[in-house]
Image (cartoon, coloured by chain):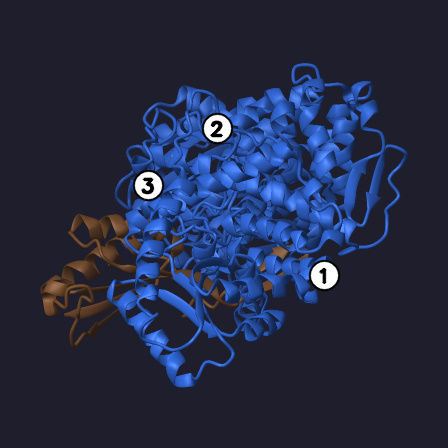
Amino acid sequence: MTVNVPAAGESACTADGRALARALTDRTDGTVIAIAQGLDGRVRLKWCMAAVGGYGRRELCPHSDIDLLLLVDRRASLQETEKALQALLYPLWDKGFTVGYSVRTVKQALRDSRDDFFFRTALLDARYLCGSMELFDGLVHGRAKESHFRDMRKFLEFLEAHIAKRHARYGDASYILEPDIKEGNGSLRDYHCVQWIFKAASLNPKAGPVASCLSDEDRAEIDEAAGNLLGIRFLLHEVAGRKTDRLSFEYQRPLAERLGYRGNGNETAAELLMRGFHCAALTVKSISGSLRSQLAVDFGLGKRGSCPTGPDFRHVNGLISFVDPGSIAVRPELLMDIFVLQSGLGGVLSSHARNVVRGSLDLVDASRHTDSLKKGFIRTLMGRHCLEALTAMLETGMLERFIPEFTTIRGRTQVDVYHTWTVDLHSVRTVHELSLLGQEVPEIFGLVRDRDALHLAAFLHDIGKGYGRPHAVIGASMARDMAVRLGFTEKNADLVAFLVHHHLLLPDIAYRRDLSEEKVALECARIARDEQTLAMLYLLSLADSRATGPRAWDDWKAMLLRELFTKSLNSLQRGVLRDPNTMIVLEERWSGLIREVQGGRLWVLPQAYVIHTETGLIKRHLRLSSGITSLDDISLDTLDRGGHTRIAVITRDRPGLFASLAGIFAMNHLTIVSAQVFTWLDGIAVDTFHVIPPWDDYAHWDRVKDHFKAACAGKLDIARGVAETKPLRKESAMTSSWQPRVAVDNAFSDFYTLIEVRSPGRFGLLYRMAREISSLGLDIHRAFLSHTGDPCTDVFYVVDELGEKITDKGMIAKIEQGIVHALT
Amino acid sequence: MKRIEAIIKPFKLDEVKNELQAIGISGMTITEVKGHGRQKGHKEIYRGAEYTVDLIPKIKLELVVPVSLVERVVQAIMKSARTGKIGDGKIFVMPIDDVIRIRTGESGDEAI
């Protein structure tokens, strides 16, 4: 079985770990034997010195423990044994060795190995050093007779239990960025396990054809890969100057230089080292894993039973295989279907099936995918067990064959504090997290119709890594091409590209912007455009973050991301952007403004203002507002619309501004028909009124201006002015008998409290209402008034002086009563 | 020496860090925390259902500086962390008896 080698043009630099370790072991043997032989004249007992564990296997690294087993005759006295031990250990300690030792008789050793699995495997590695050969032979013969060494099924059971625990603790060395060379999945220990299995099997001729489960090619490959891992471990001890098996970031560079890696434009020396390491670990993991799952079936371990699979596959005891590998030649889609099956049902590919897939990759033509291959791949992405299936696709080379672009991120390291896995596995895990989210937050998934696009985007979100920055933008166009190739419609291919392009949008905004600002949520909603896309971006961000590693994701970050999503979604579902036409209008206006307005003041415009104001008018307001600096600066822009006049008031916003304007209009007999009030983000208020002048050729706008300036200077009492102004026409008795109704709504907007007032149209009413709202300490941020019908309906968007919504029940009651009172 | 602890809004972290770096402060401890003071959490409305968020995400910043720098550090944090709205956070200044750098055994101002 061939595991993918580093990308073309890179030569793997490896150290022959076995030769290094063997040389060190031989030197150590010399020292130990010289000391041990000194025993002969000094103690009266029969002894034998054996090397066990890694020392027994001749795999010593510079800071490895020296594991020794001192076998003694069963008649040896305690004093003599103690003397012998001291004579051995003290000189070794003096030489700076870390010694692990035990003293046992042959019988004790065999008995202890029954209960202690680690000691049992240590005995499998035992190697004679010096002393009584007779004692050592006793151990070797005893081993072959003991049932716990001979019973393969039990041995494998124990082994699997230990392996499962170890892998859970140390993770997958073939993808982790700071892997454990000795204990992780795909590490040296997994290679040792293979060796132990063969050693144990050799003790029992009836164990069955265990050795034939591993082909000669596989055997040669795993030997070579493990030798490379050993070489890296050996040099890591040297570079670190201490015993450490974790290949952490700090050692990767010195180690890579030591091994002779040279960085190229795309990858540093350390990244190349890690790519090579991950490939070696993957070889060890795949070959040892296949062997063990094959043996598990042969010896009846693990999951029992078969799954219904159709005529082409077998799914027995969790192991998937081809019924007739010969038919692949005429039906290459079977190469994909086996992964579709795995993704749906779980389980692992048999070692034979893996080799069949590897050997048949030529039948998959990357440039001309058949429909069944395309559909199969998408189904694999969407399955419950997509993690197992995609990982198997990755490790058999099927994934790269089917999507050649994947080669660049294959085994690619990413050095930062967040990522745990290489880019390829991170991509696979993102798809996996997405399928978990489907069960965890079905209500959000309910907003998504094009799930295949979402899953493909999750799989491809980092495909642009390795081509420079920004990877999301580069990846988007690659992803689009791939989506088209996979048979997506143009529209959905665009969607996939969009999702890849913006996969960092939500996290970028959520952690760096003020979520209490409406502008932030609206901007996010505007980029997403609709509910489905927003939900997709959110799910993609969640899956991506969770697949990155524990440091990238926690409850704290989840809260911020969720707040942004919820607020943006609300603005699309209920808020200012709920009408799809609004979105179109908004896009047109913004692109027009960006094209036509120079000077960079566009950021001050709130979305709601842009929605409600035509582009020409916005440009006019921008021009008029440029002279407004002090509080009594005011700009009046009037336009006769025949029958009524549109008047825009532009000035600095301040508490009570709207009430003052309403009062001044009332004093001048200008009847307000409708009004829209906006506050720009730089504190400029733009209030547009439609008023009916008292007579047709009314031209006293300067008086309005003078009143405003006088009020600013404190020389005009508006309340008195309004009270003393008599309506020009008598109001009808009918309308004035209406009882006003006030409702306070906190559900509509995440940012403002809405006050809705329905009231009879009466002279000065708007002024009284606005004054009441101001006197309650509320800030009118936006208002929509319509005084054409009866009753009049007014909506005020308000916040308190701290900019917060009004949620206190007492305060809400006060608002409602206060306004009703002011109007009656 | 004083220990300065500041609770700030998450999105202000970069600004505050830059501001502190500008006055020569680079060592600090940053923690993601949750809590509330006067800003009593908020209600989120999602698909008609209301969720109450009692504890709000914040960033806690801790640093130890010589007395001579306290005023500048506090000013720098205030300047960069302020939005003027509720929930901008708080700065606590408290005395420190001694600081010892473990690697070298240096103590006092040298160890900061």
Q: On the image, numbered disc 2 is attached to which residue?
A: A6
Residue at point 50%, 42% (across, down)? A226
Foreground disc of the pair 2, 1: 1
**In the image shown, does A255 or A574 lie closer to the viewer?**
A255
Disc 2 and disc 3: Cα gap in Å?
18 Å
Amino acid under disc 2 = Pro
Chain ID at mark 2: A
Residue at point 22%, 57% (across, down)? B27
Indicate the position of residue B99 as horizontal and vertical percent values.
Answer: 17, 70
Q: On the image, numbered disc 1 is attached to which residue?
A: A151
Q: Secondary structure at mark 3?
A: helix
Q: Residues within 10 Å of mark 3 (few under 14, many from 20)?
A: many
Q: Disc 2 or 3, which lies upstream in sequence?
A: 2
Mark 2 and mark 1 residues within 8 Å of each other at the beta carbon: no
Indicate the position of residue A805 as horizontal and vertical percent values.
Answer: 50, 60
- Label disc, if present, on residue A255 of the rendered structure: 3
Foreground disc of the pair 3, 1: 1
Amino acid under disc 3 = Leu
Chain ID at mark 1: A
Q: Image check: A569 left or right of B7?
A: right
Disc 3 and disc 1: Cα gap in Å?
42 Å
* A480 versus B5 height, above or below: above
Chain B's colour is brown
* A81 versus A669 height, above or below: below
Q: Disc 3 or 1, which lies upstream in sequence?
A: 1
The quadrant where residue A392 appears: top right
Mark 3 and mark 1 residues within 8 Å of each other at the beta carbon: no
**Chain identifier of the blue chain:** A
